[in-house]
Every structure is written in structure tokens, then in C-alpha cells.
Image (cartoon, rainbow, N blue to C red):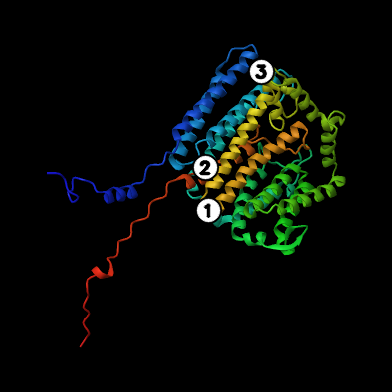
Amino acid sequence: MAPTDTDPGTPSASGSGAQEATNPPRTPNRRGIELVMLGFSAVIVTSALALISINQESQPGTQVLYYGLAFLALFGLAHLAVRRWAPYGDPLLLPLVAFLNGFGLVLIHRVDIGNATEPEGPSASAPSQVAYTAIGLVLFVLVLKVVSDHRTLAKYAYTCGLVGLVALALPAVLPSFIAPPINGAKLWIRIGSLSFQPAEFAKILLLVFFAAFLVSKRELFTTAGRRFLGIDFPRARDLAPVLVAWAASIGIVVLERDLGTSLLFFGIVLVMIYIATERAVWIAIGLSLFALGCVVAYPLFGHLQERVDAWLNPLTSGDSGYQLRKALYGMAEGGIGGSGLGGGRPAIVPYAKSDFILSTAAEELGLLGLAVFLLVYLLLTARGLRVALAARDSFGKLLAGGLSFTISFQVFVVAGGVTGLIPLTGLTTPFLAAGGSSLVGNYVLVALLLRISDSSRRPQQPSKPQPKQPPIAEAHTELVERPR
């Protein structure tokens, strides 16, 4: 007998649709692609380390094997953490960061070899960079585990803002034996053999505060005031948050002699206001205020004058332009294709491992190699902005947008300073340069991006079907007895 519509052996169309609604198709999380790309990065890093040893006319030894295995083990554990606590996070973020961090280790190891030939050269930094990478990845895993929902950070926004401002101002108020000036700027806090840069962590705390503040007070920045030359300017009373941020950034320049952190801090404020309001007038007002502050501060501080003089006259500025002059010579020596890993002399540039690591890359790998690094940073920023666009809440959108801008803006400031486009600021290249504070802080930044990405890409649980109410015509009549 042919099955009828009421035969239980034949699934009906309505039953199939109900089953699909109850069990939606599984969304791929792309963790396998992430693992393959991490393995590819490990192969590139290990091969580059071996190539340096070969070009230095020595056999690749146990040190190369140690760095390669440490890289693979650390990022393998990070991949397992992402698979466990953020399975739907963006699959490209961690491999891109691993490539930058790994090749930064390659360039630092290369400069260590060059310094070893000098009688009073600085100590090796590659082992410390591996240790800082391990610390950064531990914090990376802790953030993924502890912050199960990025929206909970908005509850602590004002606390984050207060702690961030205190951390930002701490080097300026501490005595010199705790916060010694280095190259004219007070950025570091030194306690015994331990030293760190609090501004690297303050920027993340302030990003959380700005995102939550703009979500709750967005109407302050969107209300139009007087119209002049076809532009709607904000009301005077709405300028207070920008003026406070401007005063804080100028205070950093005055008290800490740090143009880079001041520029980064104020740039983050302006860009996040623009993301929240889409009004370019805030960018114009902010840049005008910052330019005015720099013009006023320039004749008052010799450190700032030296930076500008080295920028305008790198070849004739004496000692103030020595670093930039050597970096430009090294990049010119590298040319288009570079001198090859281990074939140049990047160690003669001061701070070739940290502030000028991009000039080290340009000398050894040429303009093409430098362009590869810039494209990787561009791709990392693009993936971060994609996370911001896909976020399902306003706080997540603003926070992801601010985190992504922070990476790209730091790269622009560093690359502009090394190539002579803008004055040197002292910022470090994210993930590439030697330095513990920057590396550890940026891993926290990437963990927050992955958390927001996981929240936006995770399939939403289907809502429970509501029981259907029978039509009025088919409803049973209920008799209600009156009490006698």
C-alpha cells in the first residue's frame, strides 16, 4: 500500500521544516584553517632563522631549533585555547599576529648576532622576546577564559577609565629613580630588575571607557550647533570631553616629554568619536587643537625641538639625527630586494631591535620585504574592522573599531618616523619590535578582538516555538458557575 500523508513512515513537509528550525545547519568555525596557517608561519620563521645562520657562514645549531619549537609550542597552545573558549573567532587574527611576532624574533636574533661581534654590544634580546611572548600568550588565554562576554566590560567602564588615566600619568609623578627618563622621555617604571611601560596597558583600559561612554552619551556628539560655511559645528558645551582629552594629551607632552603616546591617545579619542557619530567636524576640531598645543609647546621644550630638527634635517642635525640618518642609509643599502637575511649590517643603527626594527627589515629584506609587513598589518586591521562591522551591539562595534585603529595608527606613526615622513615619536611596532610591555599589551588587545568576533560569528540559539492558540471558532466553551 502506498504511504499516505498520515503514514508515520513518511516525513511531512511541515515536520521537516520544524526539524530544520530546531536544528539549524552548523556554522563552520574555520579552526582547521587557523591551525594550518599557524604551521605555515612556524615553517617560515624556522626557515628564516636557519637562513641567517647559513648566511653568517655557520651551521644552524640548537638555538634555531629551540626558537622554532618554542614558537610552534606557544602558538599551538594558543590555538587550543581559541578552539576551547572562542571557537567562532576570526581564523586569521592569530596567524597574522603569529607571523609578525615570529618574524620579529627573526630580526631581533639577526641584530643579536651583529651585536655579538662588537666588544661592548648590548646583550641578546631574542631569549627575552620568547619569554615575553609566553607571558603575552598566557594573558591572551586568560582574557579569553575570563571575559566570556565582551559586554560585561561596559559595566566597569568608569573604573577602567580612572585606572587608565592613573597608569598614563604615573611615570610623570613618580621620582626619577623609579621612573627614569630614557632618551628624554619618562615612559618607563623600573622596580629592581623589572621595568614596564604602563601606557601600553592604559590604552586598552581607555578604549573600553571611550566605547562605553560614547554609547551612553552619543547624543552629546551628534547634536548640531551653529552652522558656519555649510558645516554644522557642535555646541560649545558639548566640547568638554574633547577638551579634557586634549588637555590630557598636552599634559603627556609637557610632563613626560612623550609625543608618541600623546598622539596615540588623542588620535584614539577622535577616531572613536568619528566612528560613533560619522561627523568629520570632530576630526577637524581635534587636529586643530592638537596642532595648536604642539605649536605652543615647541619653543618651551628642547626635547621636542630636537625631534623636529632631526626630522627636517636628518643629514645635518648632528647627534639628534644620528639614529634616523643611519636608518635611512641602511634602507638605501637594502634597495628593492634587500641584502638578504644575515647579509646586511643592521646592528650599526641604534635601537635596531625596537624603535628602528622596520629599518632592519628594509635593509635585510628590501622594499619588497617591508611592503609585505605593511600588507600584513593592513590585513590585520581590515580583519579587525570586519569584526567591528559584524558586531551585534554598539559597544562591541566601537571597541573593535578602536582596537583595530590602535594597531594601524601605531604602525603609521612608527613607519612614518623611520622613513622621515613625520618626526620620531618613540612608539614601538606592534608584535614586531623587542619589548615586553608592548608585546604583552597587544596580545590582550587581540584577545578582545577575538572575543568580539566569536560573539558576532557564533550561531544564535533559535527561540523556543510558542504554543499555537486555537482559533476562536474552535475554542472550547468554558462554563463558569456563579457562587450561590
Compare marks 1 and 3 and give the one earlier in the sequence: 3
Q: Is 17 drawn above or below residue 42 in the view shown?
A: below
User: Picture coordinates of residue 265 (x, y %)?
Assistant: 69, 47
Q: Residue at 64%, 47% (x, y): give it.
A: 202
**Residue under numbered circle 1:** 393
User: Would residue 174 appear left or right of 321 to someone viewing this image?
Assistant: left
Question: Looking at the image, which residue sits at the far front?
Answer: 2
User: Picture coordinates of residue 383 (x, y %)?
Assistant: 56, 39
User: Picture coordinates of residue 287 (x, y %)?
Assistant: 76, 49
Look at label 3 and name its amino acid. Answer: Gly
Q: Is residue 311 visible?
A: yes
Q: Nearer the viewer, residue 440 or 294?
A: 294
Q: Residue at 87%, 46% (x, y): give it.
A: 299
User: Picture coordinates of residue 215 (x, y %)?
Assistant: 59, 57
Q: Nearer the viewer, residue 97 or 182?
A: 97
Q: Nearer the viewer, mark 3 or mark 2?
A: 2
CA gap, disc 1 and disc 3: 48 Å
Compare marks 2 and 1 and give the one earlier in the sequence: 1
**Residue under numbered circle 2:** 450
Q: Which mark is residue 342?
A: 3
Q: Nearer the viewer, mark 2 or mark 1?
A: 1
Q: Residues within 10 Å of mark 2 (few under 14, many from 20)?
A: many
Compare marks 3 and 2 and give the one earlier in the sequence: 3
User: Would residue 152 appear left or right of 84 to someone viewing this image?
Assistant: right
Marks 2 & 1, CB-CB < 8 Å contact? no
Q: Nearer the viewer, residue 479 or 99?
A: 479
Q: What is the secondary structure assignment of the residue under circle 2?
A: helix
Q: Is 195 drawn above or below residue 149 in the view shown?
A: above
Q: Is 473 drawn above or below residue 465 in the view shown?
A: below
Look at label 2 and name its amino acid. Answer: Leu
